[in-house]
Image: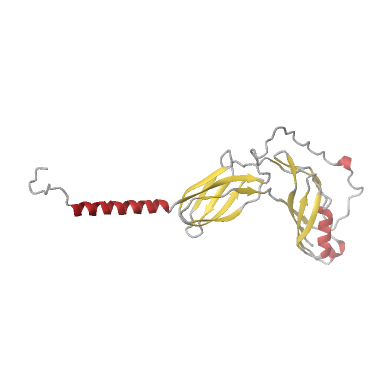
Amino acid sequence: MLNNRNNRAPASRAARLMTLAAVSCLTVALAAAQGAFASFSGTVFDQSNSFMPNVTLLLTNPQSRAKYEVVSDRTGHFEFVGLPPGDYELETKVMGFATLRGTVTLRGENAQRDLVLKIGSLQETITVTGPGTRPWPPRSASSRPPRRPDPTCTGVPAGGMGGNIRAPHKLVDVKPIYPQQLYEQNIGGTVVLQAQIDTEGRIGSVEVVTPAHPDLNAAAIEAVRQWEFDSTILNCSKIEVPMKVNVTFAPR
């Protein structure tokens, strides 16, 4: 302050304009940088249109390999913030429901999408190692395990909190029979079936997804059609459940 050589004259108009222009450019640059980031939000529902809390959602950018993870709150709401522009792969994780996969494209603008999760598929794996015979006498209805009583639900509001599953419990299990002739000829293979369990736990449709020998296909289907379960419950309502069955006939 005591240096007499310092120029204490007011800044010229040109200097003030240059300073203002520099500050303006910096402000625009910061705003543009902030605007490049976006958020992705929405609500997770189950197939009965009830919201689902505690669902893990994962966004992955395949180019940068950056990963972002959030969990839906008690109202099913989720939000990712501060996401750079790009294409993302979306994946959900929650017990009892099928994984939902999709893509999200962000170009610096906020995005919103609601997600609906479907009930997961049951998985059964069976290995048949030798020929067998049908049980005799056949299992009677009185010898089967009792069905669990259906839950008593009153006053469950439509569109309320969802994701409440009671998984099916198998009551009747019939093993496939290895055809004697194929076993002796050392012919085996794996049959993959897609079946549907109805609301009362009975087997509805059964389709061959991956075939083997026709007689092995028939043996696998015949056994699975005799299976019985108690009802699967979602939010106090009986629902159908898909089931994938892998049957391997392993010759000696």
Residue drawn at (88%, 53%), measured in percent from left and top?
A: 134
Q: Quadrant of residue 52?
A: top right
Q: Is residue 130 visible from the viewing direction of this image? A: no
The residue positioned farthest toward the front in the image shown: 13
Q: Name the side, left or right, on which 22 lies relative to 43.
A: left
| Quadrant of the frame with the N terminus | top left
The residue positioned farthest toward the right in the image shown: 137
The residue positioned farthest toward the bottom in the image shown: 185
Q: How is the image coloured?
A: secondary structure
Residue drawn at (67%, 40%), measured in percent from left and top?
A: 164
Eyeballing the image, is 226 above or below 166? below
- Near-viewer residue (99 or 26): 26
Percent position of residue 197, x then y: 77, 49
Q: Name the side, left or right, on which 238 lies relative to 111.
A: right
- Near-viewer residue (13 or 38): 13
Number of on-image labels: 0
Q: Quadrant of residue 127?
A: bottom right
- Near-viewer residue (20 or 192): 20
Q: Is residue 117 visible from the viewing direction of this image? A: yes
Percent position of residue 26, x then y: 31, 52
Residue drawn at (87%, 41%), measured in percent from left and top?
A: 143
Percent position of residue 114, x then y: 59, 48
Percent position of residue 105, x then y: 52, 56
Q: Name the side, left or right, on which 163 lies relative to 23.
A: right
Residue drawn at (50%, 56%), measured in percent from left and top?
A: 61
| Quadrant of the frame with the C terminus | bottom right
Q: Name the side, left or right, on which 13 lies relative to 93.
A: left
Q: Quadrant of residue 14?
A: bottom left
